[in-house]
Amino acid sequence: MGVFEFSIMVFTSFFSLINPLGVMPIFMSMSGNLSPHERSRVAIKAVFVSLITLIVFALAGQLIFQFFSITVDSLRIAGGVIFFMMGYDMLQAKIVRVKMDDPVESKAYGNDIAITPLAIPMICGPGAITNAIVLWADATTPTLKFVMVGIMIVVLGITLLALLGAGKIVPWLGETGNKVMMRLMGLIVMVIAVEFFFAGLTPILRRILQIE
């Protein structure tokens, strides 16, 4: 496979799986009560953690999965459970009630959501992790591997720009708008969680029941 064809495949696959525009509204609803500085810090940290995670799994994903006897389907189920719990809290507007007056609490909250669920599994989900493992195996030359890492950085850079842009929209919504957005996105996150869960559970049940 040529460098150009491989580059197109890597970009389109990662862009579709990460879906920067799809992450925006969830980021907006979760960071609505943070200060602009904290919101930007959360966005940068989430994207950075996602990049490190993708690189680690690209380099050693198969070994990690084999060592811990982990399957991608199990990862999907775990991601679905995490998503569902966070979506339920959003639907109940519980996240909005976190006190943001204390800088320490605000920073701790930002750190929490930056890693889970924004970085993992929202930005760097099972699909993106699997894609990194598979494409790294397909990158048979150092040039292709370098191109792949470069494109991952580009896609996550686009994601960061989308999140930073979303932060500018939050003040326009106001407190009521943020609460409405959070409840709506909570419902959507719960639906995504169900899809994640059953996408992982179905193949496992098929293997158990020996269904082709």
Image (tube, grey):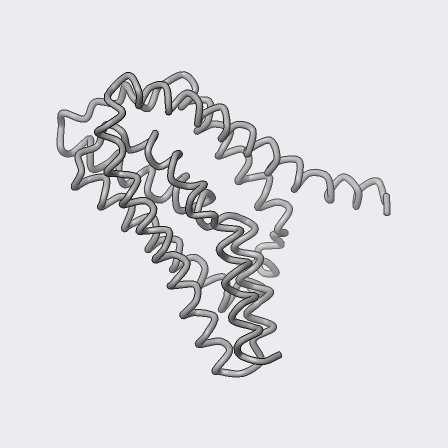
Is 69 in front, or is 54? Answer: 54
Q: As drawn, is 90 to the left or to the right of 44?
A: right
Vertical relation: 38 (above or below) 50: above
Image quadrant containing the N terminus: bottom right
Query: Picture coordinates of residue 130 (x, y %)?
Result: 57, 57
- Taking the spot 55% from the left edge, 39% from the top edge, the residue there is 78
- Taking the spot 60% from the left edge, 31% from the top edge, the residue there is 194
Query: Picture coordinates of residue 13 (x, y %)?
Result: 55, 58
Query: Picture coordinates of residue 143 (x, y %)?
Result: 48, 82
Vertical relation: 68 (above or below) 111: below
- Taking the spot 23% from the left edge, 38% from the top edge, the residue there is 168
Q: As drawn, is 116 to the left or to the right of 36?
A: right
- Taking the spot 18% from the left edge, 38% from the top edge, the residue there is 36
The image shows a total of numbered marks equal to 0
Is 1 in front, or is 70? Answer: 1
Query: Picture coordinates of residue 131 (x, y %)?
Result: 57, 59
